[in-house]
């Protein structure tokens, strides 16, 4: 069961790296701010690709992020004990409304990492019933975990080094004697490593296992 997701308070920034981290990853001195606009734009593209790879839920008119946001999610016809929220990581329930009645903190329990919400009655887990459920909650990181930071840095370095390379170029041969002869061979058909299915390089994808969500209702 997937609810209707709305952003109440968006993340203040979508980038995963600091300006100094971006400059270091690009091989620039920390005082060299000349490339900052380009580096920031690349950082945002890296963050967007990581969210795509991890299937982070998108709200209408908003950009997905792994950073903290306050969200509102509306469910109908929930029949079971487990209510899976669209976003996870450091989940904190702000309010929970069932059929117009507000539940207190002792009436529910949430697993903050996986985002599974359960209803309690007399400290026992019970089913939700078929009424309308509106959950307001915070989810996402205030401080970026070290492994997510490392994945973003590795991806950023890769993207920076590859930014001017033609992915369809198979090989390039330069012959100088009579001053310059350039021969280029290009891939025909599918380009190895560029199947279009992955949003991030394979070395980065392996670092994102914790943050990957399953698609589906």
Image (cartoon, helix red, strand yellow):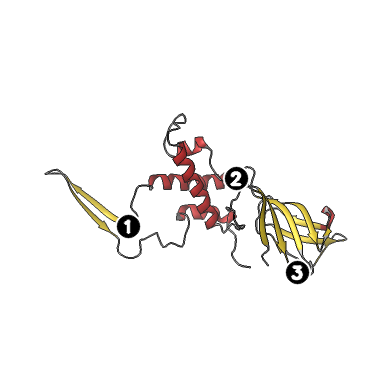
Farthest-out residue, top:
31
Q: CA distance from mark 1 to mark 3?
A: 50 Å
9 lies left or right of 191: right
Location of mark 2 (residue):
145
Give the camera-side residue of 149 and 99.
Answer: 99
The residue depicted at 70 percent of the width and 55 percent of the height is 72
103 lies left or right of 201: right
Q: Secondary structure at mark 2?
A: loop
Residue 164 position within the rendered picture, expressed as x and y whole percent measured from the top left: 35, 47
182 lies left or right of 118: left
Local crowd at mark 1 within 10 Å, few (<14), some, or many (≥20)? Answer: some
Quarter in which the N terminus is drawn: bottom right
Considering only vertical position in the picture, is 17 above or below 58?
A: above
The residue depicted at 38 percent of the width and 47 percent of the height is 163
Location of mark 3 (residue):
80
Q: CA distance from mark 3 to mark 2?
A: 33 Å
């Amino acid at each position: 069961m997937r609810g209707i997701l709305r952003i109440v308070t968006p993340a203040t920034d979508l980038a995963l790296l600091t300006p100094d981290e971006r400059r270091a990853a690009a091989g620039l001195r920390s005082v060299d701010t000349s490339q900052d606009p380009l580096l920031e734009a690349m950082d945002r593209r890296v963050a967007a690709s990581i969210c795509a790879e991890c299937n982070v839920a998108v709200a209408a008119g908003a950009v997905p992020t792994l950073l903290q946001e306050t969200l509102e999610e509306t469910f109908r016809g929930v029949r079971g004990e487990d209510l899976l929220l669209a976003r996870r990581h450091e989940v904190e329930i702000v309010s929970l409304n069932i059929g117009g009645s507000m539940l207190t903190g002792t009436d529910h329990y949430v697993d903050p990492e996986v985002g599974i919400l359960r209803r309690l009655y007399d400290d026992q887990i019970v089913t939700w019933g078929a009424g309308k459920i509106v959950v307001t909650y915070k989810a996402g990181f205030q401080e970026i975990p070290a492994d997510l930071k490392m994945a973003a840095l590795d991806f950023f370095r890769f993207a920076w080094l590859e930014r001017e390379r033609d992915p369809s170029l198979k090989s390039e041969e330069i012959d100088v004697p009579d001053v310059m002869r350039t021969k280029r061979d290009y891939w025909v058909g599918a380009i190895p490593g560029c199947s279009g299915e992955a949003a991030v390089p394979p070395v980065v994808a392996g670092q994102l296992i914790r943050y990957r969500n399953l698609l589906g209702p």
